[in-house]
Every structure is written in C-alpha cells, then in structure tokens.
Amino acid sequence: MQEKDLIKYVQGKANPDEKKSILEWIKKDIKNQKHYNQLKAKYVISSLDSAEKPDIEKAYKKFVSKKTKGSKIFYRTAVAAILLPLLTWQIFTHFYKDLKFNDGNDFFGTSTKNVITGYGSQRTVILPDGSAVTLNAESSLIYPKKFSDSSRQVILNGEAFFDIKRNINKPFIVNTEYLKIRVLGTSFNVKSYPTDEKIETTLVSGKVEVIQDRTNSLIVLNPSQRATFDKEKSNIEVDQVDSRRIVAWKEGKLIFDETSLKQVVLDLNRKYNVEFVIKSDSLLHYKYTGEFDNLSLEEVLELLKLSSPIYYKYKNNKVMINSE
C-alpha cells in the first residue's frame, strides 16, 4: 500500500472503494496495523496547535509493550458491565422541569419556541434579532418569540454554535444547567449535555463572560480559549485550544484529543444512535486521540479498534466494548 493512499484515507479524501481496500490491507497483517497507527498518530498530533508535541515513536512502543504483557495482567475485565447513560427525551423533560424550563414560558414570561434535534442531526435556527444558532445532535434550544427590551436570553441543553449579532444595549445570554454565558456580539461554542461530566464554552471570536450560577463567579474568555466546568468538582478551568477543531462537528467531524473513552462513546451515541456498553474498568480511564471525518459507524469502530487497546462486538444496535 502506497504512503500517499494511506494519507489520503487519514485525511478523509478516499472514495468508498479506496476505503474498503485500505481497511482490508490494515487488517491483513500486524505490520500494516503498526504502520497505519503510527501514520495516523503523527497526522493527528501534527494538526494540533500544541506547544509541546509528544514523542510518537516512544508512545507507540510503550503502548505495544503494554499490550504484549497479556490481558490478564495489564487489563482486568470488570465482572459487571458498565452501561453508559444515554440521552433520552425523558432526560430533556426532567432537566427542564427541575429548572422550571419545561416550556420556557415560566422563565421568559412570554410565548416561546423550542427547537429539538435528534440523533445524528443538526439544525440552524435564526433568532428574532437575526443571530444564528447551529444545534448539534440531541440538543434543545428554547427562546422567546420576541426578545425583551433589556436582554436576549436563550436556554440550551446539549451543544450549539452561536453567531451573535452585536447589540451593546442588549447583551446575549445563554442559560445552561450550571452556567450562564454572556456576550454582546461574538461567535462561540457551548457543549452542555446532562449526561456529560463537564460543560465546555469555547470562544471563536469576540469576548464572552462565563458565569457560574451558584457562586456568581465570572471568567472572561478571549478567542481560542475554552472554559471547562467540572460538575462534580464545581470548578472552572481555562485552557488554550484550536477553536476550529472544537466546532468541527458542524462539518460532520468528530475530533478527540486525549479524551476519555467514556466521553468518546457518548459523542458516538449522539451521532450514530447506537448504545455502547463498556465492559472493562480499565477502559474508563483510557484517553483517546483521533479524528473521524464523516465516516460510517463501521469504519469508526474499526479505526477505534485498530488504534486502541479494545475489541468490540456490534449486534442489534448495541456495541459491546472490552479490553484486549
């Protein structure tokens, strides 16, 4: 297999026949798998805007040595399966009822609109002031049919990209389960799913204020900064990111950078409407780095298997994941 064909596949530019041929080549020989894994890892790392890049060769050798120690030593399989919580319409209802946001009327004091997206779908909404909001899968946006004279407020459950019209007299406020995000005019991404352990706000352009409801503490973000709120610890951390990668979901891509496997499968569930069951405790702590560029579920699972210490069984719309 020529290097240029593998790079084409990694970049998501291969046609269906080329993808099938490359996948068959990868699975044919362990040497092919090693070569592909190294090439994929180098491509992912090279595309990150990190100041300090890890030693790919060293990391890969360490990974291989761990695998050869045997599954009984390095990976201990849990007796009971750990079923990851799935996002359902009942969670939507329960979440909004708790916050008195069930239809938005109690919160806004006026008639509202509620836009909901299902598994694997996206939708762009134009708000009364002309601002645009793109909703990711399994998300909900509630907003008044007409904004008040003093502010523009919406309620978000899930993930959305906001492109807000500037109005110095009417700040724009996004209300989530734990945080408020306040802006005048800017573009930013908010990821706030009830089943996720964290809430992320990433600024693309302009400036935003992230306000924690319970403490009323305030953090100001600059472009390419991300504020991550840990629900359990109830604290916020700010880091520098490539905002283009954060909002790549709008183009059908899923990009992970040292992301826990638990979070990876939650995102896969929302995109592909498939139930995931993790059956190994060790995998809950596994961090995954990789990119899925508009791939089918089968292709995603194969790449996940080839580049991670896991194997899977896919049957009846359920994916069982275990350690090797």
Image (tube, rainbow, N blue to C red):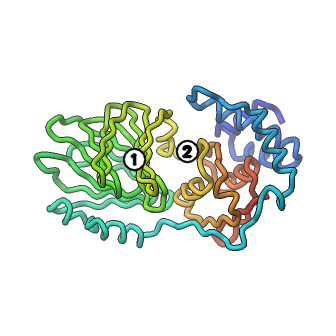
Q: Residue furthest left?
A: 149
Q: Label 2 belongs to which residue?
A: 253
Where residue 60 sits: x, y (%)?
78, 39
Circle 2 Cα neighbour tier, 10 Å, few/some/many (<14 / 14–19 / ≥20) = some
Say which quarter of the image contains residue 204: top left
User: Is 1 above or below relative to 24?
Assistant: above
Label number found at residue 190: 1
In this picture, residue 28 sits left or right of residue 79: right
In this picture, residue 227 sits left or right of residue 57: left
Q: Nearer the viewer, residue 177 or 148?
A: 177
Residue found 52% across the figure and 38% down from its top = 245
Amino acid at pointer 2: Lys
> Along the polypeptide, which appears first: circle 2 or circle 1?
1
Amino acid at pointer 1: Val
Q: Is residue 122 visible?
A: no
In this picture, residue 259 sits left or right of residue 23: left
